[in-house]
Image (tube, rainbow, N blue to C red):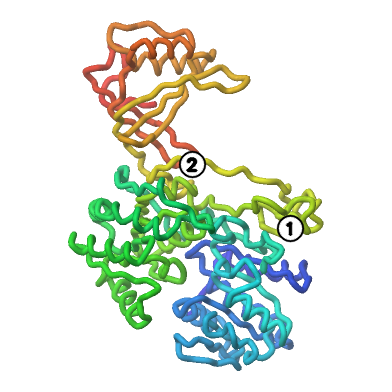
Amino acid sequence: MTFALRDYQQASVDALIDWWDRHREEDAAPLLVVPTGGGKSLIAAAITKTLFDTWPEYHPRTVVIVPSKELAEQNAEKLKAMLPRTIKVGYYSASIGRRQPDADVIVATIGSVAKHAHVLGNIKCVIVDEAHLINPKDAGLYRQFLNDLGKYCGFRLVGMTATPFRGNGVWLTDSEEALFTGIAYEIRMQTLLDAGHLAPLVLPGEVISTQIDTGTVKLSNTGDYNIRDLSEAVSGYLDGAAEEAVRLAAERNKWIAFCATVANAEQLSDLLRVRGITCEVVTGETKKPIREQLIARFRAGHIRCLVTVLALATGFDVPDVDCILWLRPTRSPVLYCQGAGRGLRIAPGKSDCLWLDFSDTTARLGPLDQIRGRKRGSGGGLGAPYALCDNCGLQVKPASSLICPDCGHTLREEEDKQFEGVSDAAILSGSKLAVIRHSITNVDYAQHFKPGKPDTLRVIYWSGLRIVAKEWVCLSHDGYARAKAERWWTRRQPEGFDFLPGSTEQAIEWLRDGFQLLKPLAIQVNETGKYPEIVGYEFDAAEQPEGSPAGDVAAA
C-alpha cells in the first residue's frame, strides 16, 4: 500500500526541518500539533524518509516512541510503505513480541524500551507520538529513556500531539523542566474540517435532559474531579443516560462511551444491554488478547458500543465511529480533546459523529476546535528565564521580549473563559447544527447596569432547573435599539394593554407591581456562536395580542 501526503502533512515536515535549522541549541525540541485523525503516523514516516533522503551519509537511525501496541503497528505500516526496502523497520515492543535494536528505524512502545536505551546504538532522531503523555517534570518512563539515550549519542527530538497542553491546560512548553521548547507547526482542526479531512461532531436535535451534577464532587490536587466522588455522582445518572442514548442514537451504528471508572463502565454496559444494545467494556484492566478480540468485533460491526474509561482515548483507530457518549465529567482539556477526537476520523458512508454529552464538559471547556493552551498562573514574567508565547507556545528568551520571534505574536496574558453549565453547548465552533428548541417554564427579569451605558432589561429563560438563554432588551436606549425593544415588549404585553415603559427602570417597576408579560412556550436557540443566540419564540396563539406575529413561531 502506498500513502500520499496531504499538503499540511508535507508542510509539517518542512516546518520541522526549518525549526531545527533555526534552533540549534542542544535542548531545543519542538512539537508538531495535528488534530486526532490528521495522520500523525504518516507525518512520522515522512520525517524519517526526509532524514534518510537528505542526509544518507549520516545514516540517521530513528526511534519512533508510542504508548501502545496499536499505535506501534500503525506507525510501522506507514514507515514500511514510505521507506525503501534497504532501510529496515523494526520493533522494540514486548506486546508485539519483537525486539530489534539493530533496525534502521525502530518503532518502540515506551513500556518496553524505557530501560533499554543502551542497546539501541547510535540514534540520530527520536519522534515521540502522543507527546502530551510525557511527565512535565524530569521523571517518568519517557524522561528516563531520553536521559539514558543522551548518555550514548546526540539526537534531535520532536513530539507529536493533538493536545499541546497538560491536563490543567498549561502549555507543554511552559516550565523550566519542559522537554519541548516550542511548536514548529500546527494545523487547526477547523482547517481540516473545512477541507473534508475530518468528520464534524454534531449535537442531537433536542436538548439532553439527563445532566450529571458535579456540584458536590471534590477536586483533586490535579485540578480535576476526585475519581471516587465522581464515580458515585455519575452512577445515579447512568440509567437515564442509557435510556436517552438508545433513543437519540437509534440511527447510529458504532458508539464509544466514556465513563469515569471501571465500575461506571460496567454499570452502563449492563444498562445498555438490557435495552438491546450489544455492548462490551474495554478498560486498562482488560487483558490484551481480550481487548484485541473485542476491538476486532467492534470494527467488524458485531458490537455496537464499546464502553471505556481511558483505554480508548488514544491510539484507537476505528474511523467509522459515529456516536460518542460522554459520561465522564472533566476539567481536563486533554481528556476532553482526546476522547472527543475518537469521532473525528472520516470513513466511507460517514458524514458526521453524534456527540452526546451528559455532563457540563462541553460548556465548561468550550468548542473542541477552539481549545488552546494557557500560561501557568505564575511565572513566565520578567523575573522568569523566558516568556511564553500564548499563540505558539515558544519559550522566548529573554523574558523581557515583546514579540515572539517564531510567529510574531505579541506576548500577553489571556483571560480565563466563563461558562454556563449546559450539556447542549456547541461541540465545534463552526458546525452547522440544528437550532435547539427549549421548552420554557419560567422567565426572570432584572435591571442590568453597565458603566457608561444605558441600563437594560435582562431576561433570563429557564427550562426546568436550567438557565437556557439570556437576552438584554434596550428600553433605555435611543434609535434602532429602542425601536427593537418596543417591538419585543409589544409582542409580550397582554391583550388590551397598549402602553410602553419609558425606560428599563419603569419596566422593572411595573413588573414588581404585578404586571405580567406573556411567557413564550418555547424558544429556539442557535448554539454555534460564542454565546447562545435566541432565533425564535413560540407563544400560545390564544394569548397573543392583536397585531402581533401570527402563528406559533415568531422570529427573534
Q: Is residue 15 visible?
A: no
Instruction: Work out whether residue 489 or residue 331 is closer to the camera in this orientation and state it.
Output: 331
Q: Which residue is drawn at the image coordinates 23% and 61% (left, top)?
A: 272
Q: Is residue 460 visible?
A: yes
Q: Which residue is drawn at the image coordinates 33% and 36% (left, top)?
A: 465
Q: Position of residue 356 (x, y in %)?
A: 35, 52
Q: Which residue is drawn at the image coordinates 39% and 56% (left, top)?
A: 230
On screen, residue 197 versus residue 149, left or right, reads: left
CA gap between label 2 and label 1 equals: 32 Å
Q: Quadrant of residue 245?
A: bottom left
Q: Position of residue 215 (x, y in %)?
A: 41, 45
Badge 1 is on which residue? 406
Q: Which residue is drawn at the image coordinates 78% and 71% (left, top)?
A: 24
Instruction: Work out whether residue 533 or residue 120 is closer to the camera in this orientation and state it.
Output: 120
Instruction: Work out whether residue 287 or residue 189 is closer to the camera in this orientation and state it.
Output: 287
> Looking at the picture, which amino acid does disc 2 mark?
Phe
Tag 1, which secondary structure? loop
The residue carrying pointer 1 sits among few (fewer than 14), some (14 to 19) or many (20 or more) residues within 10 Å by Cα, namely: some
Total numbered labels: 2
Establish if 90 lies above or below 176: below
Instruction: Check residue 431 in the rendering and tell me which mark sits there, or answer none.
Output: none
Badge 2 is on which residue? 419
Establish if 499 lies above or below 469: above
Tag 2, which secondary structure? loop
Q: Position of residue 445 (x, y in %)?
A: 41, 21
Q: Position of residue 375 (x, y in %)?
A: 65, 53
> Looking at the picture, which amino acid does disc 1 mark?
Asp
On screen, residue 207 versus residue 35, left or right, reads: left
